[in-house]
Amino acid sequence: TACGGGGGGGDDEPAPPAPVQVSGAFHDSLVEGLNWETAAGQTGITGADGRFQYQETAGIGELVSFYIGETALGQSEGFSVIIPVDIVPAATDIYNNTVTNIARFILTLDDDQDWDNEIQITQAVRDAATESNIGQINFGVTPEQFEINTAVAVSILTNLTAAGPRSLITKEE
């Protein structure tokens, strides 16, 4: 007279939600020209509006990595807006050295040095960042050390911009 158990055959479980394609924007001002890649393998370059694509499942965005050429800037869970502090693990504000150095690097490479009209990283700069073996830049040092470490890379890359060669912007700028 005992019942054999409750429940059923397990078919009652709802299917997991399907991923939805959404877009986000990279801001330090709007940033055009960053390479991006998602965990699912989507790749692209941020447009004039800073836009990139990613998949979201149940409100959670997949991991998106950002680069200039092959120089890795960082990665973040996909959000509608991503700023440099979002791509640095454990960073809580813009005063984190790594966040400061990433922002300085991006701003320095802006084609026309007018940050009010968007930041544009050109194809020539992205290509040179790949071809000149600039590759791995350590953003996690003091701002002073970062300026020393990137002097050659900044000279090579800014020489390809409309505004011409220049030094890395200061952390105060």
Image (cartoon, rainbow, N blue to C red):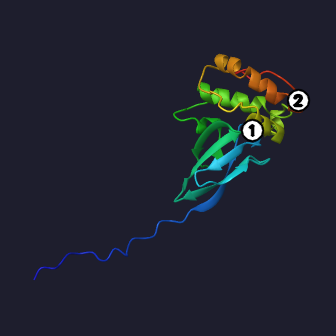
Distance between the alpha carbons at the discs numbered 2 and 1: 18 Å
Q: Which mark is residue 29?
A: 1
Q: Which of the two marks, 2 or 1, is nearer to us in this view?
A: 2
Percent position of residue 172, x then y: 71, 21
Q: Quadrant of the N terminus?
A: bottom left
Under circle 1, the secondary element is loop
Q: Kindly indicate whether the residue at mark 1 contacts the one at mark 2 (C-beta within 8 angstroms).
A: no
Q: Is residue 83 visible?
A: yes
- Work out whether mark 2 precedes mark 1 in sequence or the reverse, and give the earlier one: 1
Percent position of residue 102, x then y: 67, 31
Local crowd size for mark 2, using a 10 Å CA cut-off: few (<14), some (14–19), many (≥20): some
Is 52 drawn above or below residue 69 in the view shown? Answer: below
Local crowd size for mark 1, using a 10 Å CA cut-off: few (<14), some (14–19), many (≥20): some
Is 47 drawn above or below residue 169 in the view shown? Answer: below
Which residue is painted at 65% across and 27% down in the image?
A: 100
Q: Residue furthest left?
A: 1
Q: Which residue position is annotated with label 2?
A: 163
Percent position of residue 2, x then y: 12, 79
Q: Quadrant of the C terminus?
A: top right
Which residue is painted at 65% across and 58% down in the image?
A: 22
